[in-house]
Amino acid sequence: MTDSLQIIATLAAAQVVIAMAPGPNTLIVVHAGMRGRRLGLAAASGIWPVGFVFATLGLLGIGTVLTALPEIAGAMRIACGLYLLWLGVAAIRRSFAEGGSIVAGTPREMTAGEAFRSGMVTNLLNPKSIAYFMSIFSATGASALSGGEQMLALVMMPTISFLWYAALAFAVASPPVTAVVDRGRSWFDRLAGLTMIGFGAKLLASRG
């Protein structure tokens, strides 16, 4: 195996692991996917462009900015935590609206555009996501790759994440899962909302 192929294979393997690790992105895709395959795929699609931008910044060595200015990562952590809290509260309110407990002033059904935006914003504000991309290229020596190989890596890494999240969206939108979810959708939404709130609170309480 050539050095270039080994670097690309290492990047691919690392991306598979980071994509499969449960986190805010996974939660957003699963929650959207429970409301339909189209919404799940929209959320997964929103994650891709942010991953591409982060990968590009990481390959250019912009990670040194975060090292020199840790307050940037702190601000992102707080913003992500607050956004997850907002999404969690909205999911819980929506569950009561659909259950008929709330009539006025409740959020309407999620749209594909909102699902896409939630995937994009959650990934954009996730400090762990950007920290990963800022470090993985220097750790693997990706600067030694040719221009074409670097472009391959930039496209490959967010695409691996998208394929994983798309598979999750298809799984939770499959007929057997949908049949279970439909029988208790309001409770699933409340559980998802509480989980989002938990993730958000954990980010806000974290110091790094």
Image: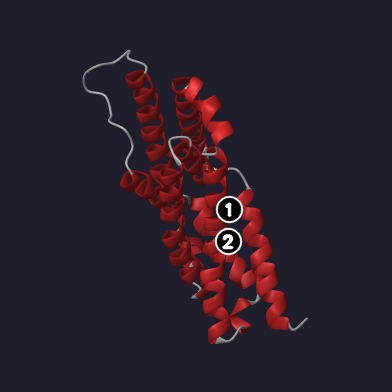
Q: Considering only vertical position in the picture, is 99 above or below 199? A: above
- The Cα–Cα distance between marks 1 and 2, rounded to whole angstroms, is 6 Å
The quarter of the picture where residue 89 lies is: top left
**Quadrant location of the N terminus in the rendered image:** bottom right
Instruction: Identify residue for label 1.
Output: 164
The quarter of the picture where residue 18 lies is: bottom right
Q: In this image, 129 relative to 49: left or right? A: right
Q: Residue furthest front?
A: 175
Of the residues shown, which amino acid type is indicated by label 2? Ile
In percent of width and height, residue 52 lies at 46, 66
Q: Considering only vertical position in the picture, is 151 above or below 40? A: below
Give 143 or 119, whichever is nearer the viewer.
119
Of the residues shown, which amino acid type is indicated by label 1? Trp
CB under 8 Å between discs 1 and 2: yes
Q: From this viewpoint, is residue 14 visible?
A: yes
In percent of width and height, residue 69 lies at 44, 60
Q: Residue at x 75, y 84 (%)?
A: 2
Give 112 or 15, whichever is nearer the viewer.
112
Q: Residue at x 47, y 40 (%)?
A: 33
Secondary structure beneath disc 1? helix
Instruction: Identify residue for label 2.
Output: 160
Q: Residue at x 29, y 15 (%)?
A: 102
Q: Quick one: label 1, few (<14), some, or many (20+) residues within 10 Å?
A: some
Q: Residue furthest top?
A: 101
The quarter of the picture where residue 35 lies is: top left
Q: Residue furthest bottom?
A: 146
Q: Considering only vertical position in the picture, is 1 above or below 36? A: below
Give 35 or 23, whichever is nearer the viewer.
35
Secondary structure beneath disc 2? helix
In percent of width and height, residue 32 lies at 44, 39
